[in-house]
Amino acid sequence: MNPVMIITGGSQGIGAAAARMAGARGYDVAITYQSNRELAEQVVADIKGLGQRAIAVQAEMASEAAILALFETVDRELGPVTALVNNAGGPGPTCKIDGVTSAILDEVMAVNVRAPFLTIREAIKRMATDLGGKGGSIVNVSSRASEIGGAGEWVHYAASKGAVDSLTIGAARELAARGIRVNAVNPGLIETDLHARAGLPDRLTRLVGGVPMGRTGSAEEVAEAILWLASDSASYITGILVPISGGR
């Protein structure tokens, strides 16, 4: 059987680029989406056009019940997951620390931190060699914000991605002997619609001067790193955080 990859938030941006690339490299793919079914179905159609199986599952990643249902659906329709990409997430509204509310923290941490914990937990049940699985690979999509800090705009987002980095390192060390590798990519200024959706359509233009390579990155460049980390080509690599930021 083909390897099976789950990509959360796979209907657009980095997730969609990774999903299409996974299909091109022989994976059967399950993507999740929150609300835009049309975008999700287009990604699925593109993967099926490559001769692979693909499904789109509507899932609110802040919901444990939705995450459980996601894995059960993948088990039933594609088979046990062999690669998991935790891509779903969001920055929350832009504000300084003294404007952050408990509601903002709950929203950002639920999707950016709690959801990856729960998806990793469910993946372990299917991947771990001591539980009868064949092993697997997990790639978390973090952010350069985890080190830069997001001051003046997104400290809450940066803090959530710092938690993802810690989760990556801890899970990698805990799961290595159980046949599961865990790594992360930390994208910088990437050409997606995240900034526009957050109400900052000029953010990339405003900050690109701070990138040593002098340009923004593409979703496909991030996807390349995700697919490499998930592949057997990275078989002796676990617990690393890969900055994809043009040197920023």
Image (cartoon, rainbow, N blue to C red):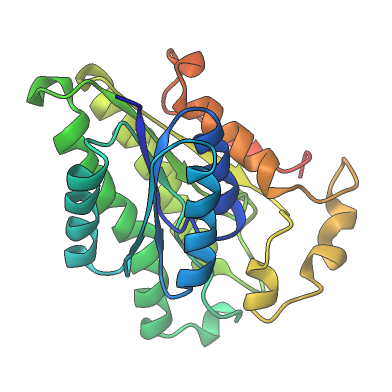
Q: From the top left corner, tell me how far across and down residue 49 is, in percent.
A: 54, 43
Residue 9 coordinates in the image, percent (x, y): 45, 59
The image shows residue 87 at horizontal and vertical percentages of 47, 52
Is there any visible trace of residue 121 in the rendered image? no
Work out whether residue 222 or residue 73 is closer to the camera in this orientation and state it. 73
Q: Position of residue 161 (x, y in %)?
A: 48, 54
Q: Answer with left or right where residue 80 lies relative to residue 236.
A: left
Question: Where 108 sits versus 114, above or below?
Answer: below
Against 29, is 157 above or below?
below
62 over 129 or under it: above or below: below
Quarter of the picture holding the N terminus:
top left
The number of discs equals 0
Q: Quadrant of residue 84?
A: top left
Residue sitting at x 17%, y 34%: 126
184 with respect to 244 (left or right): left
Residue in the image at 40% along x and 43% along y: 29
Task: Examine the rendering and report whether any part of residue 189 can be seen.
Answer: yes
Q: Quadrant of residue 199?
A: bottom right
The residue lying at 49 percent from left, 18 percent from top is 234
To which quarter of the image does residue 53 belong?
A: top left
Q: Nearer the viewer, residue 155 or 94?
A: 94
Which residue in the rendered view is the most extreme toward the left? 131
Q: Quadrant of the C terminus?
A: top right
Q: As displayed, is residue 154 above or below residue 242?
A: below
